[in-house]
Image (cartoon, rainbow, N blue to C red):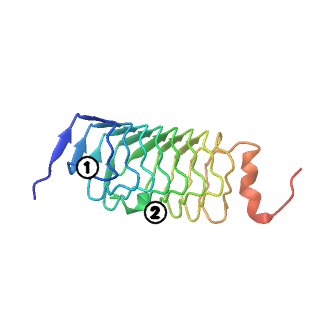
């Protein structure tokens, strides 16, 4: 089966809510100001691509390849990243809204989340070894049986992490948000 490939292209201001992306593989491409809300991106591979100021809210990623993909200023609300292809999966997020997103069992080692809203997201059984949550809001985000070894939460806020249900060895936290590790105990700290 022949795959159509787009290399080194820029797609600006396109609306993919009604029509599907024309190629099945994108290498070193830029997507700027594009609308992918509820779009079906299944079976498409993105390699070394950048999405900037794009709306990908509720986009479908069934078997989608995200290989060294950078999202900047993007709306990624409600995306199920766990439906995507695991092979060479590597992403980074800068100034993005990832609320209600799902990362079940994803390998996110050393992933950078910078200045993101990641509220009510789910990282159950995700590998977040050495991931960095730089200035991220994590209100009601679920970490369950997650590997947080060496993860950096020092500038993150509003998280609640159960150290008994996650691997937290070497993870970095700062006061006062580190108190979110005690939430399950219902203690009153003054």
Q: Is the residue under label 1 in contact with that under label 2 (CB below 8 Å)?
A: no
Q: Which residue sits at x=47%, y=63%?
A: 104
Camera-side residue of 7 and 162: 7
CA gap, disc 2 to disc 1? 27 Å
Element class at badge 1: loop
- Which x, y percent locates residue 84? 36, 59
Q: Which residue sits at x=36%, y=43%?
A: 69
In the image, taking residue 16 as reference, residue 178 lies left or right, namely: right
Quarter placement of the N terminus: bottom left
Label 2 neighbour load within 10 Å: few <14, some 14-19, many 20+ = some
- Which x, y percent locates residue 160? 68, 56
- Location of residue 185 (image quadrant): bottom right
User: Which labelled disc corresponds to residue 12?
Assistant: none
Element class at badge 2: loop
- Which x, y percent locates residue 29? 27, 37
Label 1 neighbour load within 10 Å: few <14, some 14-19, many 20+ = some
Query: Who comes first in sequence, dot 2 or dot 1?
Result: 1
In the image, taking residue 109 as reference, residue 159 lies left or right, namely: right
Camera-side residue of 17 and 151: 17
- Location of residue 31 (image quadrant): top left
- Which x, y percent locates residue 55? 43, 45
- Location of residue 14 (image quadrant): top left
Check the image and name the residue furthest to the left. 2
7 lies above or below 36: above
Check the image and name the residue furthest to the right. 190
Q: Which residue is mark 2?
A: 105
Q: Which residue is mark 1?
A: 21
Q: Which residue sits at x=62%, y=45%?
A: 153
In this rendering, the count of numbered labels is 2
**Callout in the foreground (2, 1):** 1
């Amino acid at each position: 089966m022949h795959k159509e490939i787009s290399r080194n292209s820029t797609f600006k201001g396109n609306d993919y809510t009604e029509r599907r992306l024309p190629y099945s593989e994108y290498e070193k491409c830029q997507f700027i100001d594009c609308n992918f809300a509820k779009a079906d991106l299944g079976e498409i591979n993105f390699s070394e691509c950048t999405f900037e100021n794009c709306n990908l809210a509720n986009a479908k990623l069934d078997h989608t390849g995200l290989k060294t993909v950078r999202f900047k200023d993007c709306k990624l609300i409600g995306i199920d990243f766990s439906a995507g292809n695991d092979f060479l999966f590597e992403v980074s997020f800068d100034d993005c809204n990832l609320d209600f997103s799902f990362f079940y069992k994803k390998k996110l080692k050393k992933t950078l989340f910078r200045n993101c809203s990641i509220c009510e997201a789910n990282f159950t059984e995700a590998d977040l070894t050495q991931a960095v949550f730089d200035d991220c809001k994590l209100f009601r985000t679920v970490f369950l049986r997650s590997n947080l070894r060496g993860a950096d939460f020092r500038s993150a806020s509003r998280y609640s992490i159960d150290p008994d249900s996650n691997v937290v060895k070497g993870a970095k936290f700062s006061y006062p948000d580190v108190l979110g590790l005690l939430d399950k105990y219902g203690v009153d700290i003054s």
